[in-house]
Image (tube, rainbow, N blue to C red):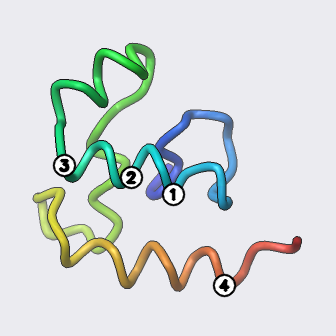
């Protein structure tokens, strides 16, 4: 789903580093996460993975139980 960048079925703090990697180096993200869909990083749903996805991602983290 949207925001699940490590493909474990949850959006949580373990998705932060993969999101940063996807934003900074999509090629390295795909190499490190070959079974994951990088488009999961398009959290705001505008069709692009970019820095405008960070705030919606952080909002999702705010709903995660520690």
First in sequence, mark 1 or 3: give its number.
1
- Mark 4 or 1, closer to the camera: 1
Whole-angstrom CA distance, mark 2 to mark 3, is 9 Å
Residue 32 sits in quarter:
top left
Where does residue 17 sit, x and y in percent of width and height?
48, 49
Whole-angstrom CA distance, mark 4 to mark 1, is 13 Å
In this rendering, the answer to whether 34 lies above or below 22 is above
Query: Pointer 4: what residue?
Result: 62
- Direction right: furthest residue: 66
Q: Are marks 2 and 3 in contact (CB under 8 Å)?
A: no
Query: Pointer 2: what residue?
Result: 19
First in sequence, mark 4 or 3: give its number.
3
Q: Are marks 2 and 1 in contact (CB under 8 Å)?
A: yes
Query: Pointer 3: what residue?
Result: 24
- Mark 3 neighbour class, 10 Å CA radius: few under 14, some 14 to 19, many 20 or more: few
Which structural element holds mark 1? helix
- Mark 4 or 3, closer to the camera: 3
Where does residue 24 sit, x and y in percent of width and height?
18, 49
Quadrant the C terminus occupies: bottom right
Query: Pointer 1: what residue?
Result: 16
């Amino acid at each position: 789903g949207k925001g699940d960048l490590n493909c474990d079925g949850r959006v949580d703090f373990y998705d932060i580093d993969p999101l940063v990697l996807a934003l900074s180096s999509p090629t390295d993200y795909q190499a490190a996460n070959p079974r994951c869909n990088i488009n999961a990083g398009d959290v705001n749903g505008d069709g692009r993975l970019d820095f405008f996805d960070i705030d919606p991602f952080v909002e999702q983290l705010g709903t995660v139980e520690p």
